[in-house]
Amino acid sequence: MNRLARILLVSAAVSVLAWLWYAAWPELFRNGMPSITEDADFALLVRLTGFVVIITVGFYFALRNLMKK
């Protein structure tokens, strides 16, 4: 159960990131990579990506420490 819980957490985070970037992919890269200071939607996408990664790492280590014997 320990390994399965961590794998499910990471796979859920990866699927959220894939959904975020897949939805924005055509518009973002049609005209080239926008600057974070110029495009508010791209800046929000970058912040959401960082938030999901940081929360996932935190929960991953929390699960690891809680399930450690």
Image (cartoon, rainbow, N blue to C red):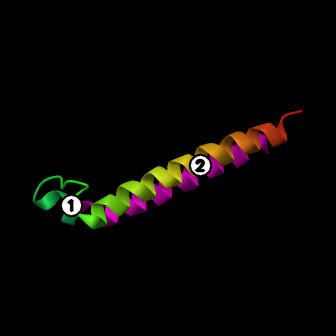
Mark nearer the N terminus (1 vs 2): 1
> Of 58 and 5, which appears nearest the observer?
58
Residue under circle 2?
A: 56
Which residue range is magenta in the image?
A: 1-25
Hey, what amino acid is under mark 1? Leu
Q: Is residue 24 above or below residue 12?
A: below
In the displayed structure, does residue 28 sit left or right of residue 43?
left
Q: Residue shown at 20%/53% (left/top)?
A: 35
- Image spot of residue 66 (x, y percent): 83, 42
Hey, what amino acid is under mark 2? Thr
Please identify the quarter of the rendering in which residue 30 is found: bottom left
Q: CA distance from mark 1 to mark 2?
A: 25 Å
In the displayed structure, does residue 68 sit left or right of residue 17?
right
In the displayed structure, does residue 57 sit left or right of residue 30?
right
Q: Secondary structure at mark 1?
A: helix
> Of 11 and 24, which appears nearest the observer?
24
Residue under circle 1?
A: 28
- Image spot of residue 13 (x, y percent): 54, 53
Locate the N terminus by quadrant: top right
Q: Secondary structure at mark 2?
A: helix
Q: Residue shown at 39%/62% (left/top)?
A: 20
* Residue 6 highlighted magenta (yes or no): yes
Please identify the quarter of the rendering in which residue 43 is found: bottom left
Numbered label attached to residue 40:
none
Q: Residue shown at 52%/54% (left/top)?
A: 52
Q: Residue shown at 23%/57% (left/top)?
A: 37
